[in-house]
Amino acid sequence: MITIERTFNAYLDEMHIITILLPFSYQQGRSSGFSLLSDVEEEFPVVILQNNPIEGAVKYTCRIDHDVEFGKQYWIVDEHGGKTDLQIGAVIRTSDFDEKFYYDGPLGISYSTEKTYFRLWAPTAAKVKLKLKGALEEDAELFPMERGERGVWSCGVSGDLDRFLYSFLVCINLEWKEAVDPYAVSSAMNGEYGAVVNLDNTKIKKPELPPLLQLTDAIIYETHIRDFTIHSGSGAQKKGLYMGAGETNTVGIDGKPTCLSYVKQLGVTHIEFLPVHDFEGVNEKSPKEDYNWGYNPLHFNVPEGSYSSDPLDPYSRIRELKALIQAVHSQGLRVIMDVVYNHVYIREHSSFEKIVPGYFFRHDQYGMPSNGTGVGNDIASERLMARKFIVDSVSYWMKEYQIDGFRFDLMGILDIETMNEVRRITESIDPAVIIIGEGWDLNTPIPEDRKASIRNQEKLPGIGQFNDWFRDSIKGSTFNLYDKGYALGNEHYYDAAKQVLAGSIGLEKKEKGIFLSPAQSVNYVESHDNHTLWDKILVCSENADLITQQKKHRLATVMVLLSQGIPFLHSGQEFFRTKGGNGNSYRAPDSINQLDWERKSRYFNNVEYIKGIISIRRSIPLFRLADAELIRNSMRFMDIKKPLIGYVLTSSDQNAECSHAAVIINPSAAEEEILLPDGDWDLIADEHTAGNSTIRKISTRLTMLPLSSYVLVCRK
């Protein structure tokens, strides 16, 4: 990269608008006229529309009638004979630019043993070169790339380039920058170069999975590749790696299943892995020295190398991640990939910014990068090529890795049209795909009605949203550690608890809800973020005895699993997962983040209880109704003493094995007697046991013990 010293600056900010900044230190910031000079010495008139003094300079807003050709060099000359290059400015953020350069074809590499083609979208570049080197070679060879339609540069290199490393050298505004291909599918160690690979040599056949007839059939179990097996008692051989997470028949110190085999037995339908795309924060040369959740994205289509057995081998990360996914599929489970398209690790260092400066990121009214994500940059998903990249990327992961769903980190940063296009394209690949995301309303400069946030859920059909109303009503505020929710004994959340149990659709009145469909409500009380539920209970119920704390925890988890919507569990939640009180463990050591498999053995009774509740949900369709009207027609709350909540679900299916199901929740410290609706009730979950077998028959009255939940059914 070279350093350019300019006496003054000129920017193309719209297709026919140039902004010129003359500092006071140069001709006192004055010039009565300017002209535009092409690289072949053609001169074009520039009309000054207005000039305004700004800090340290005079800003001239000018119009040109000449159509600037992108990829060619232009100069601005002032009345004094001063000269500066015309830089590509805010024009790249205009709709005219988007329409002119939108490209709907393939990007990245096309490999064959005879020749590999490289394609890069860089419409503002004057020159582009391909830098290519063998994996073990120090010296690189440069190949000029040819500019084609819509700003796509390409070149073909003969020979078998398998395992060759590559990058692009891009010249924009007279500066050369080196960047990794945004569409790279593998990389050198630590993502320093893209890597050419033959994906045909990594193919794995996807086994047939049990049908997923509706989104509310899903039960999601969230974990982190490293957390899942790194504990000494995990039973896995390849701890902390893709290969370890894919091991089956592992057992703990009690001789009972751990890891993937355990999750299969638990009864969930989907495993959600925290980001597995290439991220910053862990040095792949010594991966065990650092820890990171993975929300520092570098290369979106490249698997993270620190989870592979050999980060130096560009095939290792691909084959081992694919083998993990196949192992999950072999258990009859589906895989959800946590994706972070809302930002990059460092904007200035990202390939997007180096290749098309200013295009892929949002800027505020003053031209400064926006920061709704809180990490210094927001991806401008509304721009056509940014949207194309996101859609191309999720399509790639589904087709190449057989991913079954996506969890969008900070989805509220992205725009509605992009998310609906994601839903459309992924559903065309697999109708059973599940798309969920964090629809938080974040301060990013797009109109409120275009954000993919919870408040706009009616414009996002088929996309699930993490339900913070559910979370905070049941366990208490995430951001106030001492606030107790309904399950922790706070009656103030009584009415809210009833609404969220009904899928947050507004049971009596739609306006009381926040979703049009239960499939949009991802119900949870714990995730990788913030304190675990157990750690919160230890603080806000510190005077309670251990058994009482465990009962409160169980009650909250049962409410997650028996509410209408999509239940979401944080791995280890079923055995009271703790992070030692750490509320933000994104780079804490393994001792904090690891899934402690000895706790699974210690709290085996609670694990069995939660497993039983899961089996109830899966076997009784009434607990996973697919639409709001079905819920309104079938769900009735019982008239019982507050703060207890009881409700009955009635099936409209004349052939259903279970005609009615009832759930009664007692979050109080008192024993209460409940009068049941008429019917022959089978108790299938009480304070000790849960499952599909009848514990005992009950006709009219039920005694509820403190801090307990009961499930009853009428069978035909």
Image (cartoon, rainbow, N blue to C red):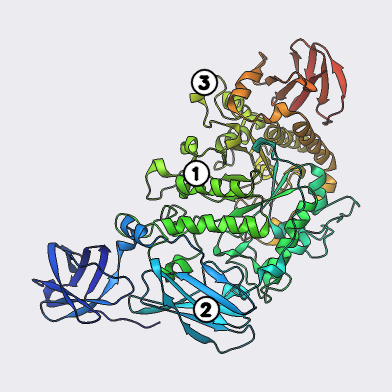
Q: Which residue lies most toward the left here?
A: 32
Q: Is residue 255 left or right of residue 677?
A: right
- The answer to whether 179 is drawn above or below residue 715 in the figure is below
Q: Is residue 413 left or right of residue 203?
A: left
- SS at circle 3: loop
Question: Can you tell which quarter of the image residue 449 is in?
Answer: top left
Where is mark 3, residue-wise?
Answer: 509
Residue at x 56% of width, y 71% of height: 109
Amino acid marked by disc 3: Lys
Question: Can you tell which quarter of the image residue 137 is in?
Answer: bottom right
- Label 2 Cα crowd, 10 Å radius (few <14 / some 14-19 / many 20+): some
**Percent x, y of residue 192:** 56, 76
**Residue 635 in sight in this render:** no
Q: Which residue lies most toward the right here?
A: 255
**Percent x, y of residue 81:** 13, 81
- Disc with the residue nearer the chain's start (1 vs 2): 2
Where is mark 1, residue-wise?
Answer: 440
| Of the pair 570 and 130, the residue shown nearer to us | 130
- The answer to whether 56 is drawn above or below residue 476 in the figure is below
**Percent x, y of residue 599:** 80, 49
Q: CA distance from mark 1 to mark 2?
A: 44 Å
Q: Is residue 78 left or right of residue 188?
A: left
Amino acid marked by disc 2: Gly
| Of the pair 43 and 46, the residue shown nearer to us | 43
- SS at circle 2: strand
Residue at x 51% of width, y 64% of height: 106
Q: Kindly report which numbered mark, 1 or 3, lies closer to the viewer in this rendering.
A: 3
- SS at circle 1: loop
Where is mark 2, residue-wise?
Answer: 156
Residue at x 54% of width, y 43% of height: 479
